Image (spheres, rainbow, N blue to C red):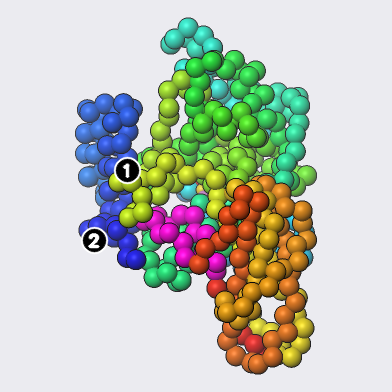
Amino acid sequence: MTSTVPAGHRRETDYDRHRLRQWLAGEARADGVSRRRLLTLLAATAAGTALGAPSPAHAAPGPIVKPVPPEWFITRGTNAETRWEALRGTGHHTPNERFFVRNHTATPVLDAQDWRLRLWGSGLRGAPGEERPVEFGYDDLRALPAVTRTAFVECAGNGRSFYPTQQGETVPGTAWTLGAIGVAHWRGVRLSDVLRRAGLSRDAVDVQPRGLDAEYLSGGESLGRVRRPLPLAKALDDVLLAYEMNGERLPPDHGHPVRVLVPSWVGIASIKWVGDIEVSAQPLYSPWNTTFYRLFGAAYPPGGSAPLTRQTTKSAFELASGATFAAGRRHVLRGRSWSGAGGVCRVDVSTDGGATWRPARLHDRPRAGTWTRWSVDWRPDAPGAAHLLARATDTAGRTQPDVAVPNEQGYLFDAVVRHPVTVV
Ligand SMILES: Nc1nc2c(c(=O)[nH]1)N[C@H]1C(S)=C(S)[C@@H](COP(=O)(O)O)O[C@H]1N2
Ligand SMILES: [Mo]
C-alpha cells in the first residue's frame, strides 16, 4: 500500500503543518480553541517558514549528555538508538549507559535541589477557579513511600524503518530499526499517592505531565513544551514518578531528577524532566495525543484512531544486521520479545526465511511490561545469505503478524522482522 499523505504534503514540514491544521480543527470541535485563536495560529503557521532558526534553548552543546559510542548506538538526529548486538549478555535490564534516548529537543541539565513539581488545574479540590496549586520538592517525593518496578520504555515509532524496507510504504519520522526500547528497574513514588496528597477532586478526568525541556518546534511553529494527557484511570493504576533507574540516580538523558513512567504504554507517555502536572476536570488535548501518536490512514477513521496507549508485540535478535556465521558449526541465537498487552509466553524462530519454525527456549518468566529473553540453537550447513525470523505470542493471545497494518506516521510496527545474516 502507498502512503495516503497527499502529494503536496510529502515534505516533512508541509506534512506537519497539514497535521497541525487537522489538530486545530479537531481541538476547535472539542471546544479547546476559540475560532479567533485558531485563525491566529493558522496565520502564524503560514508564516512559519521564516522561523527555522533554533532558539537559544536549543543551542546546548549537544542533544544528549551521555557518551553515545558507535559500538552501542546509532545516532539519529537528537536521538540515539541502541544496537541490538550491544544488548548481548547484558541481562534482563538494559544498562543505563546503553539505554536508547529519544529527545524532541535536547537534554536539559537540572539540579534536583532547585526542582519543583507543581500540580494545578480544575481537577484539584477547591472552588471553581480557586483550585490551589500544590508543589512538591525532590526531598518531599523521596519522603513518600517508594515503589520499584521493572518496565520497558519503547518509542511508538520503534521499528518504523520496516514499513519502507519490508512493506514498501513511505513514512516520515525517525527511521528506527528495533533499538528504540530499553528495560530498566525503576524506583520512585506512585503518581496516585502524589495526586491524592495534592487533593484530587471527584471530577478529575485527565492529568497532563509536562517536561522542562525546551519548546518543540515543528514546521517552524512552536508546539510548546512536550506534554501528553493521561486518563485518570491509568494515572491511578500503575504510573510512577521515577527518580532512580537501575539503582542509580535518574541520569540526565532519561529525565533527571524525575520522570513519569507509564508501564506498557508508548514511550511518549513517560514524560522526562517533569515540571508540572495539570489535573483537569475536562478532557485535555496536546499535539502529542492529537496530531502525533494516533493512527491515520486508510484503515482508520478520518480523524485518526484514539490516542495510542499500549505498545504492540515485537521481537529482536541480539545480532547486528548482516552478522556472519560459520557454516557447519552450532551457534546459539539469542533474542528478546515483548508486548504492551501482557508477558510474552511463546516465541517461534525460523532460520530459513519463514519456511519452517520451531519454538525458542524462554529464559524469563512471562511478565507484563517487560521482555522475555529466549534462545535457539542453529547449525547452518550451506554458505550464503539467510534471514532469521522470530514471532512472539503474548499472554493476551496476540501473535505478531506477517504484515503490519500501515499508518501515515509509521507507528506501532508489529510484524515479524526479517533479520539478514550471512553464512560463510
Ligand atoms: N520531556 C520530554 N519527555 C519525553 C520526551 C521528550 O522529548 N521530552 N520524549 C518521549 C519519547 S517520544 C520517548 S520514546 C521516551 C524516551 O525515553 P528515554 O529517552 O529515556 O529512552 O521519552 C518520552 N518523554
Ligand atoms: Mo517516542
Residue appearing at x 62%, y 49% in the figure: 396
Residue position marked by numbered label 1 in the rendering: 303
Magenta span: 403-417
Label 1 is placed on what type of residue? Gly
Few, some or many residues within 10 Å of mark 1 (<14, 14–19, 20+): some
Residue 33 location (% of width, % of height): 30, 28
Residue position marked by numbered label 2 in the rendering: 7
Q: Is residue 141 shown left or right of residue 413?
A: right
Q: Is residue 213 above or below residue 52?
A: above
Q: Which element type, helix, strand or loop, lies under badge 1?
A: loop
Which marked residue is nearer to the observer: mark 1 or mark 2? 1
Task: Please say whether residue 408 is visible from this viewpoint.
Answer: yes
Residue 386 location (% of width, % of height): 59, 83
Residue appearing at x 55%, y 53% in the figure: 312
Tell whether circle 1 marks a residue whose Cβ is less than 8 angstroms from ligand 2: no
Question: Is 330 within the magenta?
Answer: no
Q: Is residue 251 above or below residue 5?
A: above
Marks 1 & 2, CB-CB < 8 Å contact: no
Residue appearing at x 47%, y 65% in the figure: 403
Label 2 is placed on what type of residue? Ala
